[in-house]
Amino acid sequence: MASRIKLFLVVFILTAIGGGIAAYKHARLGLPLRAGELPEQWLVEAKITFIAPPEGGKVSARLSLPAAAVEEGLGQEAGSVGYNYYVEKDQGEYTAIWASEKQADNQAIYYRVSFPGRRTSGGEPMPHAGGGLPAAVNPGFSGSLQDAAKRVIQRAKSVSADPDSLFVGIFGEIAAIDASQEVGLLRARYEDESGRGALTILGIDLLNMAGVPARVAYGVRLEEARGGQQPTRLVEYYDGAYWKVRDPDEPSATLDPEKMFVWNRGGGSLFEVTGGEASQVVFTVIRGFIPLEDLTDLRDSPLLISTIFGLPASEQAVFRYVVLIPLGAFVVVVLRNLVGIATLGTFMPVLLALALLEIPLDSGLIMFTVIIAAGLWFRFLLSRLNMLVVPRVAACVVIVTLLMMLLSVVSYKLGMRDGLQITLFPMIILAWTIERMSLIWEEEGKRSALMQVGGSLLVAVIAYLFMSVKQIQYWAFYFPELLLVLLSLIILIGRYTGYRLSELFRFRDFKEA
Amino acid sequence: MGVVGINMRNARYLLPNNPRRLYDLVDNKLRTKQLAVDHDMAVPETYGVVRSPHDTALLDRLLGDRDSFVIKPARGSGGKGVLVIVAREGPFFLKPSGVKLTLDEIRHHCSNILAGLFSLGGRRDVALIEYRVHPARVLTEISFQGAPDIRVVMLHGYPVMAMLRAATRESDGRANLHQGAIGIGIDLATGRTIRAVHHGHPIQLHPDLKVPVVGVQLPHWDAILDIAVTCHEMTGLGYLGVDVMIDEALGPLMIEVNARPGLAIQLANGVGLLRRLEPAMERWKSHPHDSHQQKLEFSRKTFGVK
């Protein structure tokens, strides 16, 4: 009995702590309990990394800021310890400047902007700043390049009437897959010099040569992706009255404010680091529910668990997935210990469910089934070779890899982009699943093997459905202390000694003699 | 109903009564057999142990000219990886089903065992080669091929339930009830079979052989219960199942001890385990110093069919 009291005490304490912190956050800090009460927020974070001299020295970093963010009063903040920070304004352009005298080795500087869904991308037509008219800068081609460039411009001009259509014409021509000889020549030259983004630079030079002032702008794609993104090069050109920003990949469309956020325009450099080496900038985009100002309050609150919001956006993006794993484990506990579904490997379904979160459910399940079925067939071929166990599983890994490549290629050729995401499946787990399934197939018959794989799939799908509920994701991420409540639930189930649902079925005919 | 489910078995009987450190005694059949021999218990004779890939190369020397033997993983569970050879025919070895195996195939089976394919958690393992039990006539008469075994479940040394598992055509020589073997409940007091189930339904006759399986008197019942209680004493496990086979010539032989005995025994006996486990637990608490003999008497008296 004493252990029972201890059990309930532990459960009660965990629930009280978890629920208490959550209630405090809700009542005192005003964090809503339901997802969707606040409009969605985009959080865009720029992260500049560089290496300061090891002995320390004077370093400074400049990051051009989205003018819209400063002028519209969007939530913004800069993060960096030990730096002197200020914002400089020059002709409608804003630049954040960090300076320090005593930094050494690896450095990271953050700047965050958050905003609700917008109707403007920041790339709207804008009059020329600084008075007068901008002048096109002739790129100064020579020799055969000049001839080639001239011909390309002539062709584009012949089908266009104004700078807008010239822009479409030039970018249409240089981005075409079956490009003309002249374009091929120019492309080869630019790819040598500027590598990635060569086409954009080439197009800008051609526009300038045609008498349309043009320059580079930088944008951030509003897409949540793991691992951050490089800034996207956009083109800003002057149509005689306004500067306009367009995406060279979609020359005929204006920027979609739901997909693109223009970070820098005006032709200045995006960022500059003096005194450091190997500098680069990476953007991370996450979709949240809480405006940056409120997040700051949360972060400063004394509760330790809240500090997840103090992490840079790139790490926060990882945590969005990490906090879902316990939820998947909980679903497995419920389905195994209360319902009694047999699965292959205890937590294999959780990994599968995590993969499904990023792939559409139907194509994910089809790919899984195809790989397992084909893998099993190969495994039976392999079993004739009488191989030892570990080499056999390794052989399975090789086969699974090849199958994945094959599936990706086939589905890509058929025009299904989903096939490319197949690499998200945990390969080693798939190989072990095939191995174990084939053993069960031989030892207990195919019925048992199919039942267990089917059980695993069912559990994975249920875990996936559970983990993909918006409200659940919201709680897990913004109220991670509720995981303590989940923990106490798991502890309670751990002490459940009643029947499993499947046992009621198993013992249904039981009559005592 | 008093039926025990897996959650209850684990939480109320396994975890509190079976200390983790004792598991290896029974999960490793080499150690179990050694313990049994130390306690003068009859077990199938070990012909050899394959411990390394090198030993598999010398397999023919280990086998000598024996016609029948059993190869099993020392850490196997639930009958996984058990290979029974009943005879030789030229270069081939015959399984009970008549399938012919070459020496190479047997070697491959051994290397699978060594790699841990059948062991709990995939640990590296060793393969045991041992005497194949020739089951007593009474038992072969009620089993379609395969060797029937007797399982006695005990709590703190009090036998609480027993059953006999016999193979059918459907179960293909195997004794797992969910694969179609029949489970036959045994009266603890007398060793007489009292009830039989096939796929959960009571039967009187063997489905293939059409002979009565209820009312059969098992030989050596006293010795079997004696072996079971000794297994508890030598391992110290509180909740365990002991598997025994009866050899025509050698009498009852202890095959293995199981620290996680299954729940199908309740179906075979038509009695929920809780009805037996609770009185046994009471008795153990009130008489913690019962002797071997007193435990046997208590069980036979309390749980026997009157």
Image (spheres, grey):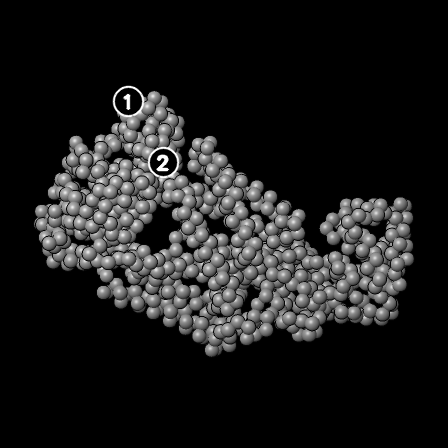
- Find the distance from the CA under tag 1 to the CA under tag 2: 22 Å
Numbered disc 2: what chain?
B
Would residue B105 be seen by someone viewing this image from the given angle?
yes
- How many discs appear? 2
Please say if A387 is above or below B181.
above
Image coordinates of residue B154 in percent, x first then y, are: 19, 50
Q: What residue type is labelled 2?
A: Ile
Are discs 1 and 2 less than 8 Å apart at CB? no
The quarter in which the C terminus of chain A is drawn is bottom left
User: Furthest residue to the front?
Assistant: B210
Would residue A293 be seen by someone viewing this image from the given angle?
no
Foreground: disc 1 or disc 2: 1
Residue at image coords 66%, 74%:
A73
- Whichever of labels 1 and 2 marks the residue nearer the N terminus, that label is 1
Please say if A31 is above or below A193.
below
User: What kind of element bears circle 2?
Assistant: helix
Image coordinates of residue A211 in percent, x first then y, are: 88, 60
Q: Residue B65 carries which label?
A: 1
Q: Which amino acid does label 1 sit on?
A: Asp
Numbered disc 1: what chain?
B
Q: Mark 2 points at which residue?
A: B113
Q: How crowded is mark 1: few (under 14 residues within 10 Å), some or many (20 or more)?
A: few
Residue at image coords 16%, 44%:
B216
